[in-house]
């Protein structure tokens, strides 16, 4: 999810521990809203363009193999806190928070939270790959199919991409909207002030071996065929799993507690007994 | 030719990996899998319609890794119909539905060899329109033992004026379905009832039947898995392929044929393979359709 | 200088260039904590047993691959380790391709490389890649994971783009989009409109204004001021029948 993705990145870069809200149902449609350019409005849904080939391993309770699920937990009361009792807080000094509601968050940039408004177009080749953060596809919603096709086709013919900003939860994203094999794709971009300068790393040095290096590179030039490279770990893990599946080395989680038999079961049992007697006579 | 674009009901589908043998070394390729689901669709779709599907996908074939998928892939076609159904207490899952041929073919292209369906339709996930007795033979028992149990269950139910229908699991077991009126039935009802049936069967036929899940109790016996009557459970759909050695399918079997096969003691007759399935469905599967829309009521919900 | 994340050695055709990895992007964004509404206690994320409804400490957790309803095959740490790539310090460059051949959608993450010992080889490689407009396709193992990437020049420096594996990229044709007949006139006006609205990409001009507004809002609230609430607007979709009209009006507006 875009929101979580952003948070994960932020956590990585500043080292601060962050949390994301537990699953808000329905979590699958990442976002739905409108893409607009000039007076044309296209209803769309955001879907993944990248499906990490990760094998999903479930966390289980070691004692009985019950599945575990993520939940927000109040350490003071030692209890699970339901979604409706959770609120965002900004820490202004240690232990002191300003509470911010969902409505307040949405009010910060209300014009951008439901609409990706393309204000200008660019030549996508001008965007360094360094700016790309996370790509998604846009899928047209009912009634938007034709204008969606038009935007994709016109951007394809002109080799242009749209630039827009939009807000999801507590983040504003700079995005490019691109035509990709007849579909519209959107990628979030890093802001330029988030890109670190590279010039401090390597001062211009004299390059004595450059000719040797150039010759070597020339000899190794080829076309880009990414299919040649695959994720071996996934294959290895799958084959380990598969061996175990073959051996039927599976464990079983317990059924949730059965409620006591409902009322009227005595009647049911006697009806069944009666039917059973009749059946036995017949056979 | 490993990929191809087809148009079904004016919807374009790009099919991939068509030459992949899904049942090596049997030679049942992805093309044949898609052909099978296309041919069987007219018989199968009524049983899939309006139900939240759980897919068992085998992208590399049945002898390789698979995954169990409830969420409908996000990169589904826009026309793919989905259903949002609560899962557990907090989550809602968006499931695929196969309400038409193109959806079924699209799912087949995902290498969804097995299609599993819940006992309730997605628009009323708490109200089952059937009750099931999943007859699962333990080690040392077989489909003929299941057949014996199925016939007793049939008679027991008919004593309570309940009609039932049987199908093979496509593996070693049998499934007995009792169509019900979803408007008048909850999972609590079907669970209570099926559990009572399983208990009484175990009591009367202790050498043949067990109602307990634990493997050690199942040896040489038929396990009547009543716990499938739950909103969270799914059963393999009738006519679905099974991921076993050969491309066998879960197939309807009339009580008459079941009695006959049981008396002939020929377990092989319970196996139906994909290549013969659609012709056989045409000839023999008609009775199973009666199951749909037959609105029976369980005796303890009569009050 | 940002901290070093990893140290390795670029290798190809008998050439070796020792480097240090650094972050290329740093985000500083407003971070919220999640609190309990009733008592404002900061909440922690915990793994809860679905059956016991109680937190399960890490020591009592095991990993399982789901094979059926409630059925799992357990995978232990040793088995996970078997799937890990062999540790190494080498960034193996297998081949070179022209810059521009790599679809930017493949780029997952970018690192800067700093020369570790030999300034000369480093400088020569950066200069050669720049002159030849080439990128080196490479693989390496870092922190128990195998990576696939592209090495390129960035000014006088080198940059390493971590690439996604091909099978992770969803193909557009899997979206099952229906084709729609478009008139040449509609597409023509659409193209014209796009041309009119085209500018050069100047990343510096897009600031994160929202971030500033968000900070202002928090500030206000901290001082006890009321926050005005606005509801986001929903745009009405352009009907297929009125698309041409909307395009023509847009073009007039842009002119």
Image (cartoon, rainbow, N blue to C red):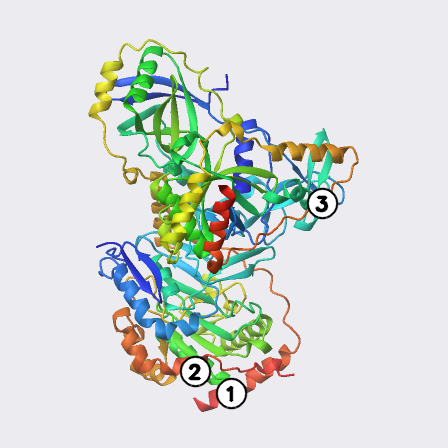
User: Where does label 2 land, which residue?
Assistant: B290
Q: Nearer the viewer, mark 3 or mark 1?
A: 3
Q: Residue at x 79, y 36 (%)?
A: C224
- Marking on residue B33: none
- Marking on residue B159: 1
Locate residue C240, reporting x and y percent.
46, 59
Q: Residue at x 60, y 64 (%)?
A: A258
Categorize mark 1 by other alpha carbons within 10 Å: few (<14), some (14-19), many (20+): some
Q: On what subunit does the disc labeled 3 rest?
A: C
Locate residue A30, reporting x and y percent.
52, 48
Q: Nearer the viewer, residue C161 or A80?
A: C161
Q: CA distance from mark 2 to mark 3?
A: 57 Å
Q: Are marks 2 and 3 on the same chain?
A: no
In terms of sequence position, does the residue under pointer 1 or pointer 2 come before the other? 1
Secondary structure beneath label 3? loop
Q: On what subunit does the disc labeled 2 rest?
A: B
Q: Residue at x 42, y 32 (%)?
A: A127
Secondary structure beneath label 1? helix
Locate residue A169, reporting x and y percent.
60, 43
Q: Quadrant of residue C7?
A: top left
User: Where does label 3 land, which residue?
Assistant: C229
Tell me, yes or no, if residue B71 can be seen here.
Answer: no
């Amino acid at each position: 999810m875009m929101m979580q993705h952003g948070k994960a990145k932020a956590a990585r870069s500043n080292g601060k521990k962050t949390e994301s809200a537990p699953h808000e149902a329905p979590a699958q449609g990442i976002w739905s809203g409108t893409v607009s350019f000039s007076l044309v409005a296209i209803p769309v849904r955001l879907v993944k363009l990248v499906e990490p080939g990760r094998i999903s391993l479930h966390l289980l309770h070691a004692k009985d193999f019950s599945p575990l699920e993520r939940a927000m937990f109040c350490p003071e009361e030692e209890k699970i806190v339901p979604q409706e009792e959770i609120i965002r807080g900004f820490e202004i000094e240690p232990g002191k928070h300003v509470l911010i509601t969902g409505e307040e968050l949405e009010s910060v940039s209300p014009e951008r939270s439901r609409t990706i408004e393309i204000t200008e177009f660019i030549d996508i080749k001008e965007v360094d790959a360094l700016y790309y953060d996370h790509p998604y596809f846009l899928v047209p919603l009912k009634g938007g199919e034709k204008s969606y096709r038009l935007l994709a086709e016109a951007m394809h013919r002109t080799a242009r991409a749209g630039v827009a900003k939009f807000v999801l939860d507590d983040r504003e994203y700079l995005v490019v909207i691109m035509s990709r094999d007849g579909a519209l794709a959107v990628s979030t971009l890093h802001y330029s002030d988030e890109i670190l300068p590279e010039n401090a790393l390597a001062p211009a040095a004299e390059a004595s071996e450059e000719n040797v290096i150039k010759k070597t590179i020339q000899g190794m030039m080829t076309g880009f065929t990414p299919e040649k490279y695959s994720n071996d770990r996934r294959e290895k893990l799958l084959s380990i799993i598969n061996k175990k599946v073959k051996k039927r080395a599976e464990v079983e989680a317990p059924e949730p507690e059965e409620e006591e038999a409902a009322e009227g079961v005595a009647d049911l049992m006697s009806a069944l007994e009666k039917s059973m007697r009749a059946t036995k006579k017949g056979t | 030719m490993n990929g191809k674009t087809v148009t079904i009901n004016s919807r374009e589908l790009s099919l991939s990996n068509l030459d992949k043998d899904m049942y090596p070394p049997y030679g049942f390729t992805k093309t044949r899998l898609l052909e099978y689901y296309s041919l069987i669709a007219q018989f199968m779709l009524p049983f899939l319609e309006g139900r939240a599907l759980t897919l068992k996908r085998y992208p590399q074939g049945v002898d390789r890794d698979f995954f169990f998928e409830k969420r409908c892939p996000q990169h589904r076609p826009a026309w793919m119909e989905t259903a949002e159904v609560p899962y557990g207490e907090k989550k809602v899952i968006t499931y695929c539905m196969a309400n038409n041929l193109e959806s079924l073919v699209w799912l087949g292209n995902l290498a969804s060899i097995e299609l599993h369906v819940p006992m309730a339709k997605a628009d009323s996930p708490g109200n089952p329109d059937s009750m099931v007795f999943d007859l699962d033979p333990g080690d040392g028992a077989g489909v003929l033992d299941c057949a014996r149990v199925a016939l007793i269950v049939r008679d027991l139910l008919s004593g309570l004026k309940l009609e039932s229908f049987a199908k093979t699991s496509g593996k070693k077991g049998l499934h007995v379905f009792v169509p019900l009126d979803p408007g008048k039935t909850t999972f609590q009802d079907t669970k209570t009832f099926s559990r009572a049936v399983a208990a009484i069967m175990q009591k009367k036929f202790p050498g043949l039947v067990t109602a307990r899940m634990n493997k050690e109790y199942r040896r040489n016996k038929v396990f009547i898995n009543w716990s499938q009557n739950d909103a969270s459970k799914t059963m393999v759909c009738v006519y679905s392929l099974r991921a076993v050695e050969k491309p066998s399918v879960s197939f309807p079997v009339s009580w008459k044929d079941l009695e006959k096969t049981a008396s002939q003691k020929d377990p092989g007759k319970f196996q139906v393979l994909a290549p013969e399935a659609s012709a056989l469905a045409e000839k023999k599967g008609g009775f199973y359709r009666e199951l749909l829309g037959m609105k029976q009521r369980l005796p303890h919900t009569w009050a | 200088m940002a901290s070093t994340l990893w140290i390795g050695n670029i290798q190809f055709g008998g050439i070796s260039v020792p480097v240090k990895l650094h972050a290329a992007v740093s985000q500083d964004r407003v971070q919220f904590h999640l609190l309990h509404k009733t008592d404002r206690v900061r909440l922690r994320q915990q793994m809860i047993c679905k059956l016991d409804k109680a937190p399960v400490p890490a020591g009592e957790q095991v990993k399982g691959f789901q094979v059926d309803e409630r059925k799992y095959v357990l995978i232990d740490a040793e088995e996970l380790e078997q799937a890990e790539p062999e540790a190494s310090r080498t960034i193996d460059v297998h081949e070179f391709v022209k810059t521009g051949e790599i679809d930017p959608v493949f780029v997952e993450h970018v690192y800067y490389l700093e020369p570790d010992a030999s300034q000369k080889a480093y400088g020569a490689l950066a200069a050669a890649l720049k002159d030849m407009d080439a990128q080196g396709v490479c693989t390496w193992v870092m922190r128990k994971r195998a990576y696939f990437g592209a090495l390129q020049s960035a000014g006088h420096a080198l940059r390493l783009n971590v690439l996604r594996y091909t099978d992770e990229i969803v193909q557009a044709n899997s979206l099952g989009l229906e084709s729609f007949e478009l008139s040449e006139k509609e597409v023509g006006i659409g193209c014209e409109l796009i041309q009119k609205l085209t500018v050069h990409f100047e990343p510096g001009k897009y600031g994160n204004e929202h971030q500033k507004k968000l900070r202002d809002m928090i500030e206000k609230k901290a001082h006890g001021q009321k926050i005005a609430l606005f509801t986001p607007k929903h745009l009405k979709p352009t009907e297929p029948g009125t698309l041409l009209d909307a395009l023509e009006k847009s073009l007039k507006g842009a002119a």
